[in-house]
Amino acid sequence: MNLDSLKAFVGAARWFGGKGRDFEIGEVRRLAEVPGAPRPDDQGPTTYLHLVEVRYDEGDSELYQVPLVFYPDPEARLEHAFVGWWEEPELGWVHAYDALHDKEAMAGWLHAFDTKPEGDLRFERIPGHDLDLEAPAALFSGEQSNSSVRYGEDSILKVFRKITPGTNPDIAIHEVLTEAGSEHVARLYGWIEAATDDGLLHLAMLQQFLRTATDGWELALTSVRNLFAEADLHADEVGGDFAGEAARLGVAMAEVHATLAESFETGTIPAAEVAEAMKARLDAAVRVVPELGSFQAQLRGAYDALAALEELEV
């Protein structure tokens, strides 16, 4: 493997968390292979799943997941996902591409949840949903820390790029909410894990695709945009009053947290500690956007009311 090409690819990736820091590529491990999906003529390309160690000049390191697909000749359709050109011991000279951009390669990941191939990689399923194995794969653009592949209208595979040994909280939380029948989150269909010398590694999670799902932050931004578009009117007169949506979001969040509290250990923290942290964030925000200063008194009053609760359950 060409480490210089791999370093250039990792350093330029949106999901790489070490931008601006000097680093080198350390150990590169080929963790497993994911066979391609069956086709009338043969089967799709195999994905070679690598764990890449990034070593920073300061002495710390991080582990990233880099699934690659190899082709003997250049693939024009994947030019934007080109990683490098080198000689592989068992395959000869190959052109390497980020496999998540290759819809044919990613079809193999979906089929693996159905066939459960033997090996170090385990494709775990939660009963209750029949996957659409013919759904076309398409990579979402714009994500920062992870990469998500959508399979038609059926499911989304969230691939964790930065890997930390142990149970991934995203999977653990969604598993609990799915088994509890929560209607406020996308159902968890399954996940990919591997048992290594470093312990359990959670690599990806497969979820329900919700076309009508709406992000709360985006709702709030839409409300603000509507309000500023008609500055001479009140928020409720331009459809920009966010109070109703905020109330529904609060109810949904409360129900989700109540469900989680039934399955995970809970504790308490001083309310004043949380309030002080929120005040510190407010001060930082005002330094960046001085116009927020006119709202400080109201916000600090709300934080003081929070501090008066003494203890918060978490």
Image (cartoon, rainbow, N blue to C red):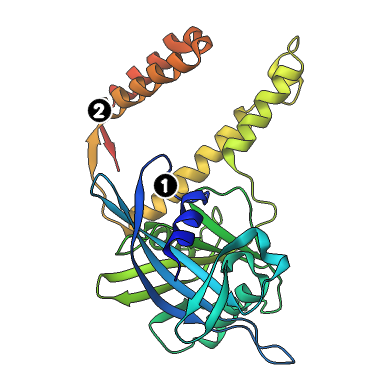
Image quadrant occupied by the N terminus: bottom left
Name the residue at 25% across, 28% down.
Answer: 273
Figure check: 235 above or below 117: above
x and y, in percent, of residue 73 in the image: 66, 76
- Where, by quadrant of the figure, is residue 196 drawn? bottom left
Q: In this view, does 187 lie above or below 44?
A: above
Give the residue type that dot 2 points to. Glu
**Residue ID at (40%, 75%):** 30
Q: Is mark 1 on a helix, strand or loop?
A: loop
**Callout 1: 10 Å neighbours few (<14), some, many (20+)?**
some
Residue 109 visible in rendering? no
222 with respect to 279 (left or right): right
Q: Where is residue 169 in the image (x, y as percent from the top left)?
A: 37, 57
Q: Name the residue under label 1.
A: 17
Query: What crowding class fits label 2: few (fewer than 14 Cα within 10 Å), some (14-19), or many (20 or more)?
Result: some
Q: Considering only vertical position in the picture, is 217 above or below 145?
A: above
Looking at the rendered image, the quarter that the C terminus falls into is: top left
Residue 273 got which mark?
2
- Residue 27 appears left or right of 146: left
Residue 301 at x, y percent in the picture: 39, 14
Any part of residue 222 in sight: yes
Task: Indicate whether 151 appears above or below 243.
Answer: below
Q: Quadrant of residue 36?
A: bottom right
Q: Give the spatial CA distance, label 1 vs label 2.
A: 29 Å
